[in-house]
Amino acid sequence: MNLSLITQNGQFFFHAGLMALFIFGASVLFTTLIAIICGTLATLRPAAIRVPIRLVIEFFRDVPQVVSVFFIFFGAPVFGLQLGPLAATILALSLWGGANGAEIVRGGITAVPHHQFESARSLGLSPYAIFTAIILPQALLPIIPAYAGLCNILMHSTSLAALVGVVELLKSAQIVIDRAAYYEGGAPGLTVYGFILFVYYIAGLLMSAAISWLEKRFGQSRAEQRF
Amino acid sequence: MGQERAVHVIRTVDLVKFYGNVQVLNDIDFVIGKGERVVIMGSSGSGKSTFIRCLNGLEPIQSGNIVFDGQDIGGNTERQWRLVRRRIGMVFQNYALFPHMNALRNLTFAPVRERLMTPDAAEARALALLARVGLADKAKSYPAQLSGGQQQRVAIVRAMMMAPEVMLFDEPTSALDPETVGEVLAIIQDLTSEGLTSIIVTHEMGFARQCADRIVYMDRGRIVEEGHPEAFFTQPQTDRARRFISTHR
Amino acid sequence: MSSPFDWSYFWSIAFLFLKGLEMTLFLAVICNALAVILAYVFAAAVHFRIRVVREMILFYVSVIRNTPLLVQIFFFYFGMPEIGVRTDPTTSGIIVLTLWASAYQTANLRGGIDNVPRALTEAMRALGLRPIDAFVFIVVPVATRAVVPAMMNTMVSTIKNSALLSAIGVPELTFVAMDNIAETYRAIENFVALLIGYLAIVLGFSAMMTSLERYLGRGYRR
């Protein structure tokens, strides 16, 4: 073990961590937007809207995440879309997350009892009001656990950016190890990759704690609404 | 009635049971003689289910003795309890049949697996018992394919497979539809009519009156009254028992 | 770039893709099979509260599930040789992917075991069954049936995640495609082939599992 590898490169790792955090935040943001929009559209009746969306969702669900990253980065130029590594990763993760999230949202909306639509309609609410005020809140609360699972995967997926050259945590580890291997002893690989695992582990525990707090809060207000 | 019999099958002395800080059983002294049928009654929370669950070690006790067949088993280890449980059958409120085994295999599994019976002997006994409770044609049915009453009948004969010396019934009809309660009670009465020592926790007044040799009435973790069913139902000695009888009639 | 899709090139890489497909299928079968076997062993050790072993397994499951698989792959493949454990890419890949999948399968199984109705466990005790018999013949079948869908999801994830092994040079589907692209710069044909490969595996697996589920469920439901 050669812990000086960590301490000497503290600032470098810190910046790499911020990069990972940025990829994570951006993908979660876009994932959420895509999931709500596409998940909702997928519940609509006209087949012209429903079928293509279901197909795209199915595509991103069946293909490995890393393949969609490579596809956006190496394949998009064929369609005239030139993206840098960072933008390509965020776009790929967002599309992947959006597809999986849309499936979750769709499930949540279909699970809302039909009489909720009918009673809302009988009150004379506009379709927009029915959707945003009645259906969406009921659909979103029960899917928090599945959504949290998706966010957890997205957090781990930030490491895929390393494969297209973004200097996030994994890539920073590679760089530090490559530099160290020539003149330093110890076990740079185990030390530095172990350190990255540790960072992700702590971040994962923090996120779990945040999610269970969220669940408890919303779960409670929901239980109160019941009575 | 039971006291004058020479042979005690089970006797408890000063049995005490806590759930955390809550005392649920308070100095229970209880005796059941060979071949006796005792019905335990009491409102919910009186400790009656907990009490019979202590008798086969499903619930650990904090102090007191449980004497079974002349031996104190109150301080048994789980391993020792296992041997006792093979001699004490138990029927639960919610049947608890193994969902992935058909009725026949539910009956034969434990005795065959634990090498207490040969597969042939177990199957023969199982089929005979199933026929006796009117389920001869259901041997190959899975629990999910049986009604609640049918499942409970299977559960009863499962508990009787190893010819237990004592049977414990923990509210055997509470989870059943009102229409099927009678059929299960009739089966219990029939199977225990030949001198099988049994302790039955139930709310069924008619059954208790007709079938029990003795009623034990529990309240707040104590035995407050016991006696012959006629005496208990016509002249209860305590206010609590009187109120209980009048509300459950 | 006269034609966007070159059919003759597409057919010329078909053989390479079949080799990649073979490797991906091999990884899928071996890693999933080993992972499920390990998961039962781990879940049993946790269930019977074997001292120290239980804590070690719970820690391993928690670490695997809370860190990225790609980092685990690098940690093993580039880190372990430093303490004398040197394995080729494919062996390393099998080891890491198996350990990854078995952590998730252990968690699935533990969920199923914890949810076996209390009434059933009491009935087993009341019948005087030995704990090991109760576990093997009652707890495991009942728990397994409840978590079959979750275990299948994990298996599909394992298949898709085998693509990450391309990063250390395991010659599976994704590696073949990226290798071709690096050589010829023909992205679109390779991605189409890659897509077909994964769709075939994932959809084929799902179909197989659905029929298995139906087979297991027979007689069980009313």
Image (cartoon, coloured by chain):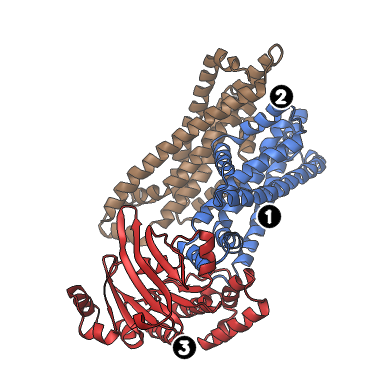
Chain colours: A brown, B red, C blue
Discs 2, 3: same chain: no
Q: Residue at x 35, y 82 (%)?
A: B4
Where residue A227 appears, as percent x and y from the top left, is 25, 56
Q: Chain of mark 3?
A: B
* Mark toward the viewer: 2 or 1: 2
Answer left or right for C2 relative to A149. Answer: right
- Disc on res. B194: 3
Where residue B39 appears, as percent x and y from the top left, is 35, 79
Q: Is residue C31 above or below residue B113?
A: above
Q: Chain of mark 1?
A: C
Q: CA distance from mark 2 to mark 1?
A: 40 Å
Question: Mark 1: which secondary structure?
Answer: helix
Dot 3, crowdedness within 10 Å: few (<14), some or many (≥20)?
A: few
Question: Mark 3: which secondary structure?
Answer: loop
Q: Answer yes or no: do the residues labelled 1 and 3 have beta carbons within 8 Å?
A: no
Question: Mark 2: which secondary structure?
Answer: helix
Residue assigned mark 2: C82
Q: Quadrant of the N terminus of chain C?
A: top right
Where residue B151 appears, as percent x and y from the top left, is 48, 77
Discs 1, 3: same chain: no
- Amino acid under disc 1: Gly
Which badge, 2 or 1, is on the more N-terminal residue?
Answer: 2
Q: Chain of mark 2?
A: C
- Amino acid under disc 3: Glu
Q: Answer yes or no: do the residues labelled 2 and 1 have beta carbons within 8 Å?
A: no
Q: Residue at x 54, y 59 (%)?
A: C146
Dot 2, crowdedness within 10 Å: few (<14), some or many (≥20)?
A: some
Answer left or right for C167 relative to A46. Answer: right
Q: Residue at x 49, y 65 (%)?
A: C120
Residue assigned mark 1: C204
